[in-house]
Image (cartoon, coloured by chain):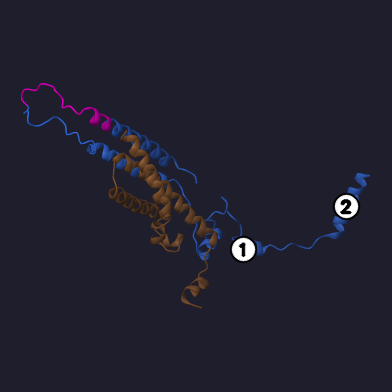
Protein backbone atom coordinates (compact mmCIF):
# COMPACT_ATOMS: atom_id res chain seq x y z
CA UNK A 1 0.00 0.00 0.00
CA UNK A 2 1.89 3.02 -1.25
CA UNK A 3 0.27 6.26 -0.24
CA UNK A 4 0.35 8.94 -2.89
CA UNK A 5 1.15 12.52 -1.99
CA UNK A 6 -2.33 14.03 -2.60
CA UNK A 7 -4.03 11.52 -0.34
CA UNK A 8 -1.40 12.11 2.34
CA UNK A 9 -2.05 15.85 2.16
CA UNK A 10 -5.81 15.24 2.23
CA UNK A 11 -5.51 13.02 5.31
CA UNK A 12 -3.33 15.56 7.12
CA UNK A 13 -5.59 18.50 6.27
CA UNK A 14 -8.84 16.76 7.16
CA UNK A 15 -7.55 15.36 10.45
CA UNK A 16 -6.52 18.89 11.38
CA UNK A 17 -10.03 20.05 10.47
CA UNK A 18 -11.56 17.23 12.52
CA UNK A 19 -9.43 18.08 15.54
CA UNK A 20 -10.50 21.71 15.24
CA UNK A 21 -14.16 20.70 15.00
CA UNK A 22 -13.80 18.52 18.09
CA UNK A 23 -12.14 21.37 20.00
CA UNK A 24 -14.79 23.89 18.99
CA UNK A 25 -17.60 21.50 19.93
CA UNK A 26 -15.98 21.07 23.33
CA UNK A 27 -15.63 24.83 23.77
CA UNK A 28 -19.24 25.33 22.73
CA UNK A 29 -20.49 22.83 25.27
CA UNK A 30 -18.36 24.50 27.96
CA UNK A 31 -19.77 27.90 27.03
CA UNK A 32 -23.36 26.77 27.01
CA UNK A 33 -23.03 25.06 30.39
CA UNK A 34 -21.25 27.96 32.12
CA UNK A 35 -23.14 30.85 30.56
CA UNK A 36 -26.54 30.00 31.99
CA UNK A 37 -27.16 33.60 32.97
CA UNK A 38 -28.12 35.78 30.04
CA UNK A 39 -25.58 38.41 29.06
CA UNK A 40 -26.24 41.64 30.94
CA UNK A 41 -24.80 44.06 28.42
CA UNK A 42 -26.99 47.11 28.36
CA UNK A 43 -28.18 47.61 24.82
CA UNK A 44 -30.63 50.38 24.30
CA UNK A 45 -32.33 49.37 21.11
CA UNK A 46 -32.78 45.62 21.57
CA UNK A 47 -36.07 44.45 22.94
CA UNK A 48 -35.80 42.92 26.41
CA UNK A 49 -38.28 40.14 25.66
CA UNK A 50 -35.77 38.02 23.69
CA UNK A 51 -32.89 36.62 25.75
CA UNK A 52 -29.38 36.62 24.30
CA UNK A 53 -28.68 32.99 23.43
CA UNK A 54 -30.74 29.86 23.87
CA UNK A 55 -28.78 27.60 26.23
CA UNK A 56 -30.00 24.21 25.16
CA UNK A 57 -26.51 22.69 25.18
CA UNK A 58 -27.39 19.80 22.89
CA UNK A 59 -27.60 21.77 19.65
CA UNK A 60 -24.34 22.55 17.92
CA UNK A 61 -23.93 25.60 15.72
CA UNK A 62 -24.27 24.93 12.03
CA UNK A 63 -20.64 25.68 11.21
CA UNK A 64 -19.27 23.07 13.62
CA UNK A 65 -21.71 20.49 12.28
CA UNK A 66 -20.70 21.22 8.72
CA UNK A 67 -17.02 21.23 9.62
CA UNK A 68 -17.31 17.83 11.27
CA UNK A 69 -19.22 16.27 8.38
CA UNK A 70 -16.92 17.71 5.72
CA UNK A 71 -13.73 16.79 7.54
CA UNK A 72 -14.87 13.22 8.16
CA UNK A 73 -15.92 12.72 4.55
CA UNK A 74 -12.63 14.17 3.30
CA UNK A 75 -10.74 11.93 5.72
CA UNK A 76 -12.63 8.87 4.48
CA UNK A 77 -11.92 9.83 0.87
CA UNK A 78 -8.25 10.33 1.71
CA UNK A 79 -7.92 6.99 3.46
CA UNK A 80 -9.79 4.98 0.86
CA UNK A 81 -8.03 6.55 -2.11
CA UNK A 82 -4.58 5.95 -0.67
CA UNK A 83 -3.57 3.00 -2.78
CA UNK A 84 -5.34 -0.08 -1.43
CA UNK A 85 -4.91 -2.93 -3.84
CA UNK A 86 -7.32 -5.73 -4.55
CA UNK A 87 -6.71 -8.67 -6.83
CA UNK A 88 -9.21 -10.08 -9.29
CA UNK A 89 -10.77 -13.25 -7.91
CA UNK A 90 -11.55 -15.13 -11.10
CA UNK A 91 -8.63 -17.32 -12.12
CA UNK A 92 -8.96 -16.37 -15.75
CA UNK A 93 -8.70 -12.67 -15.00
CA UNK A 94 -5.94 -13.05 -12.40
CA UNK A 95 -3.73 -15.40 -14.42
CA UNK A 96 -4.08 -13.23 -17.51
CA UNK A 97 -3.15 -10.15 -15.49
CA UNK A 98 -0.12 -11.86 -13.98
CA UNK A 99 1.08 -13.10 -17.34
CA UNK A 100 0.79 -9.70 -18.99
CA UNK A 101 2.36 -7.94 -15.99
CA UNK A 102 -0.69 -5.87 -15.00
CA UNK A 103 -1.06 -7.70 -11.69
CA UNK A 104 1.99 -7.95 -9.45
CA UNK A 105 2.75 -11.00 -7.34
CA UNK A 106 4.52 -10.05 -4.09
CA UNK A 107 5.23 -6.62 -5.50
CA UNK A 108 7.02 -7.68 -8.68
CA UNK A 109 6.22 -8.89 -12.15
CA UNK A 110 6.15 -12.67 -12.28
CA UNK A 111 7.74 -14.00 -15.45
CA UNK A 112 5.83 -16.63 -17.33
CA UNK A 113 2.62 -16.20 -15.42
CA UNK A 114 1.17 -18.40 -12.68
CA UNK A 115 2.04 -21.63 -14.42
CA UNK A 116 5.54 -20.61 -15.51
CA UNK A 117 7.02 -23.42 -13.45
CA UNK A 118 5.49 -25.97 -15.80
CA UNK A 119 7.44 -24.52 -18.70
CA UNK A 120 10.85 -24.87 -17.09
CA UNK A 121 12.67 -28.13 -17.83
CA UNK A 122 16.21 -28.80 -16.72
CA UNK A 123 18.63 -29.78 -19.46
CA UNK A 124 20.91 -32.82 -19.41
CA UNK A 125 23.64 -32.86 -16.81
CA UNK A 126 27.16 -32.82 -18.22
CA UNK A 127 28.53 -35.56 -15.99
CA UNK A 128 32.01 -35.61 -17.51
CA UNK A 129 32.47 -31.88 -16.98
CA UNK A 130 31.32 -32.12 -13.40
CA UNK A 131 33.66 -35.04 -12.76
CA UNK A 132 36.57 -33.01 -14.17
CA UNK A 133 35.67 -30.06 -11.94
CA UNK A 134 35.47 -32.36 -8.95
CA UNK A 135 38.90 -33.85 -9.54
CA UNK A 136 40.41 -30.39 -9.91
CA UNK A 137 38.76 -29.33 -6.69
CA UNK A 138 40.20 -32.46 -4.99
CA UNK A 139 43.68 -31.55 -6.28
CA UNK A 140 43.36 -28.04 -4.94
CA UNK A 141 42.23 -29.33 -1.57
CA UNK A 142 45.30 -31.58 -1.49
CA UNK B 1 -23.90 -30.98 -10.48
CA UNK B 2 -26.05 -27.95 -9.81
CA UNK B 3 -25.78 -24.61 -11.49
CA UNK B 4 -23.45 -23.02 -8.96
CA UNK B 5 -20.97 -25.89 -9.05
CA UNK B 6 -20.95 -25.81 -12.80
CA UNK B 7 -20.36 -22.07 -12.74
CA UNK B 8 -17.38 -22.55 -10.42
CA UNK B 9 -16.11 -25.33 -12.67
CA UNK B 10 -16.26 -23.16 -15.75
CA UNK B 11 -15.02 -19.97 -14.09
CA UNK B 12 -12.64 -21.04 -11.32
CA UNK B 13 -11.76 -18.50 -8.61
CA UNK B 14 -8.55 -17.89 -6.69
CA UNK B 15 -9.32 -18.47 -2.98
CA UNK B 16 -6.28 -16.57 -1.69
CA UNK B 17 -7.30 -13.44 -3.58
CA UNK B 18 -10.89 -13.78 -2.35
CA UNK B 19 -9.70 -13.97 1.27
CA UNK B 20 -7.19 -11.13 0.86
CA UNK B 21 -9.80 -8.89 -0.77
CA UNK B 22 -12.44 -9.47 1.90
CA UNK B 23 -9.82 -8.83 4.59
CA UNK B 24 -8.85 -5.53 2.95
CA UNK B 25 -12.50 -4.48 2.67
CA UNK B 26 -13.30 -5.33 6.27
CA UNK B 27 -10.15 -3.48 7.37
CA UNK B 28 -11.34 -0.40 5.52
CA UNK B 29 -14.80 -0.73 7.04
CA UNK B 30 -13.56 -1.04 10.61
CA UNK B 31 -11.16 1.88 10.17
CA UNK B 32 -13.83 4.11 8.69
CA UNK B 33 -16.49 3.09 11.21
CA UNK B 34 -14.32 4.30 14.08
CA UNK B 35 -13.90 7.59 12.23
CA UNK B 36 -17.68 7.77 11.80
CA UNK B 37 -17.95 7.18 15.54
CA UNK B 38 -15.74 10.22 16.16
CA UNK B 39 -18.05 12.32 14.00
CA UNK B 40 -21.17 11.02 15.72
CA UNK B 41 -19.65 11.79 19.12
CA UNK B 42 -18.74 15.33 18.13
CA UNK B 43 -22.19 15.92 16.66
CA UNK B 44 -23.72 14.58 19.88
CA UNK B 45 -26.10 12.14 18.23
CA UNK B 46 -28.22 9.97 20.48
CA UNK B 47 -29.81 6.54 20.17
CA UNK B 48 -31.43 5.82 16.80
CA UNK B 49 -30.01 8.92 15.12
CA UNK B 50 -26.50 7.64 15.76
CA UNK B 51 -27.18 4.26 14.24
CA UNK B 52 -28.87 5.89 11.28
CA UNK B 53 -25.71 7.99 10.90
CA UNK B 54 -23.65 4.80 10.97
CA UNK B 55 -25.85 3.24 8.31
CA UNK B 56 -25.56 6.24 6.01
CA UNK B 57 -21.82 6.46 6.66
CA UNK B 58 -21.33 2.80 5.79
CA UNK B 59 -23.22 3.29 2.54
CA UNK B 60 -20.99 6.28 1.76
CA UNK B 61 -17.84 4.27 2.54
CA UNK B 62 -19.04 1.39 0.37
CA UNK B 63 -19.64 3.79 -2.50
CA UNK B 64 -16.12 5.15 -2.05
CA UNK B 65 -14.63 1.65 -1.99
CA UNK B 66 -16.46 0.64 -5.13
CA UNK B 67 -15.43 3.86 -6.84
CA UNK B 68 -11.80 4.24 -5.80
CA UNK B 69 -10.49 0.81 -4.85
CA UNK B 70 -12.49 -1.35 -7.23
CA UNK B 71 -12.68 1.07 -10.12
CA UNK B 72 -16.45 0.73 -10.43
CA UNK B 73 -16.42 -3.03 -11.00
CA UNK B 74 -17.22 -4.77 -7.68
CA UNK B 75 -18.01 -8.13 -9.26
CA UNK B 76 -14.39 -8.53 -10.36
CA UNK B 77 -13.06 -8.35 -6.80
CA UNK B 78 -15.76 -9.94 -4.65
CA UNK B 79 -18.17 -12.79 -5.28
CA UNK B 80 -21.34 -11.03 -4.17
CA UNK B 81 -20.56 -7.72 -5.87
CA UNK B 82 -22.19 -4.70 -4.21
CA UNK B 83 -23.82 -6.64 -1.40
CA UNK B 84 -20.56 -8.11 -0.17
CA UNK B 85 -18.92 -4.70 -0.03
CA UNK B 86 -21.74 -3.19 2.04
CA UNK B 87 -22.23 -6.14 4.37
CA UNK B 88 -18.53 -6.79 5.08
CA UNK B 89 -17.82 -7.05 8.81
CA UNK B 90 -20.95 -5.31 10.11
CA UNK B 91 -20.69 -6.49 13.72
CA UNK B 92 -17.06 -5.47 14.12
CA UNK B 93 -17.79 -2.14 12.49
CA UNK B 94 -20.69 -1.43 14.83
CA UNK B 95 -18.49 -2.25 17.82
CA UNK B 96 -15.76 0.14 16.73
CA UNK B 97 -18.37 2.77 15.95
CA UNK B 98 -20.04 2.56 19.38
CA UNK B 99 -16.66 2.58 21.11
CA UNK B 100 -15.45 5.86 19.58
CA UNK B 101 -18.97 7.32 19.60
CA UNK B 102 -19.30 6.99 23.38
CA UNK B 103 -15.70 8.04 23.92
CA UNK B 104 -16.02 11.28 21.96
CA UNK B 105 -19.51 11.96 23.30
CA UNK B 106 -18.03 11.86 26.80
CA UNK B 107 -14.95 13.87 25.82
CA UNK B 108 -16.79 16.69 24.12
CA UNK B 109 -19.71 16.98 26.51
CA UNK B 110 -17.51 16.98 29.64
Position above or below: A83 against A130:
above
Badge 2, how many Cα within 10 Å: few under 14, some, many 20+?
Answer: few
**Which residue is depicted at the point 32% across and 50% down?**
B51
Magenta residue span: A28-45
Name the mark on residue A134. Answer: 2
Does residue B32 appear left or right of residue A94 in this picture? left
Quarter the C terminus of chain A occupies: top right
Q: Residue furthest right?
A: A142
Q: Position of residue B76 (x, y in %)?
A: 45, 61
| Prevailing SS of the magenta stretch | loop
Q: Is residue A75 visible?
A: no
Reading the image, the residue beneath label 1 is A115
Q: Is residue A120 left or right of residue A47?
A: right
In the image, the chain rendered in blue is: A
- Mark 1 — on which chain does it sit? A
Magenta span has A32? Answer: yes
Amino acid sequence: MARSLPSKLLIAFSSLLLAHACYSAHEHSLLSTTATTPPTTPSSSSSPSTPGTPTTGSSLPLDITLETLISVSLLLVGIISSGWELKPISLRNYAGGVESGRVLVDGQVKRGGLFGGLEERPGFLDVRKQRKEFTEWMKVQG
Amino acid sequence: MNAEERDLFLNPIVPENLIANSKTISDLHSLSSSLLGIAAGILGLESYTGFLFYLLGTLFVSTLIVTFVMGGKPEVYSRGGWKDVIAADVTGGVMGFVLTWTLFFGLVRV
